[in-house]
C-alpha cells in the first residue's frame, strides 16, 4: 500500500477510483486470458496475483482506493481469485487481441457478481524498451546532474 500512497502524493490527489492489478508478463503463459494452462506453474502464478490483490490495500485504505480490478486473466483463474480473495475485484479487463471475443464464462460470471467487464485492444508492448530508454535517459541524466550539484560532487564521475 506504500506504493499507492506514494502515487497519490505524486499525483497531488487523495483518492483513486480504481487500482488495476496487472498480470505480470512472466505469468501470462500460465494465467493469461489465452493460456488454458494447468498445474503448479498456474497455481503459483495465481497465488502470487492473489497476494498482490490482497496487499493492494483497498479494504483498509480509508477510502483512498475505490476498488481493485484485474487484467487479462484466463476466466477460470479470475473466478478462482474472486472466490478466494477477501478483497473482491470489482472489474476485469480483457484484451480482445488475445481472445477476439469475451469468453461467455467470464461474461456470465461478471454479470452475476456485478463485476465491470472492460475490453481493450492494446498491443502487448505499449512502449518498447529502447524507446522508453531514449525518452527517460535525458531526464535521468538531468536529475543525476542536479543531484550531484546539490551534493557538492559535480566534478565526480
Image: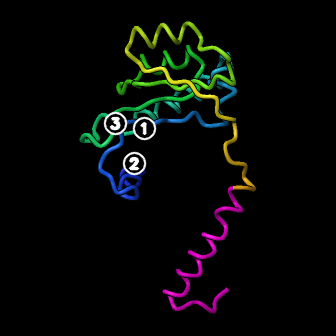
How far from the left and from the top, in percent, is residue 117? Answer: 48, 20
Query: In whole angstroms, how far apart are the C-alphas of marks 3 and 1?
Result: 8 Å
Height in image: 104 above or below 117? above
> What residue lies at 55% left-to-right and 18% top-to-bottom?
77
The residue nearer to you, when weighing 21 against 128, is 128
Q: Quadrant of residue 38?
A: top right
Is residue 139 magenta-colored? yes
How far from the left and from the top, in percent, is residue 47? Answer: 52, 28
Height in image: 27 above or below 102? below
Q: Which mark is residue 58?
A: 3
The residue nearer to you, when weighing 133 against 35, is 133
Q: Quadrant of residue 120?
A: top right
Q: Secondary structure at mark 1?
A: strand
Q: Quadrant of residue 86?
A: top left
Residues at marks 3 and 1 touching, judged by CB atoms closer than 8 Å:
yes
Residues at marks 1 and 2 touching, judged by CB atoms closer than 8 Å:
yes
Q: Residues within 10 Å of mark 2 (few under 14, many from 20)?
A: some
Q: Secondary structure at mark 3?
A: loop
> What residue lies at 64% left-to-right and 22% top-to-bottom?
96
Task: Return the residue at label 1.
Answer: 19
**What stretch of residues is rendered in magenta?**
132-157
Q: Is residue 59 left or right of residue 105?
A: left
Q: Secondary structure at mark 2?
A: helix
Image depth: mark 3 or mark 1 in front:
1
> What residue lies at 56% left-to-right and 24% top-to-bottom?
119
> What residue lies at 37% left-to-right and 15% top-to-bottom?
114
How far from the left and from the top, in percent, is residue 48? Answer: 53, 33
Q: Is residue 9 left or right of residue 110?
A: left
Task: Return the residue at label 2.
Answer: 4
Q: Which mark is residue 52?
A: none
Amino acid at each position: 500500500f506504500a506504493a499507492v500512497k506514494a502515487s497519490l502524493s505524486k499525483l497531488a490527489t487523495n483518492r483513486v477510483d480504481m487500482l488495476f492489478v496487472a498480470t505480470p508478463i512472466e505469468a501470462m503463459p500460465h494465467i493469461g486470458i489465452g493460456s488454458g494452462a494447468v498445474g503448479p506453474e498456474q497455481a503459483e502464478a495465481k497465488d502470487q496475483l492473489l497476494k498482490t490483490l490482497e496487499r493492494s490495500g483497498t479494504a483498509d485504505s480509508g477510502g483512498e482506493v475505490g476498488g481493485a480490478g484485474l487484467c487479462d486473466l484466463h476466466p477460470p483463474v479470475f473466478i478462482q481469485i474472486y472466490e478466494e480473495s477477501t478483497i473482491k475485484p470489482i472489474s476485469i479487463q480483457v484484451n480482445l487481441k488475445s481472445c477476439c471475443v469475451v469468453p461467455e464464462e467470464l461474461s456470465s460470471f461478471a454479470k452475476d457478481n456485478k463485476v465491470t467487464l472492460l475490453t481493450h485492444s492494446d498491443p502487448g508492448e505499449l512502449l518498447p524498451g529502447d524507446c522508453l530508454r531514449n525518452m527517460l535517459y535525458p531526464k535521468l541524466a538531468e536529475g543525476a546532474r542536479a543531484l550531484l550539484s546539490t551534493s557538492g560532487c559535480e566534478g565526480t564521475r
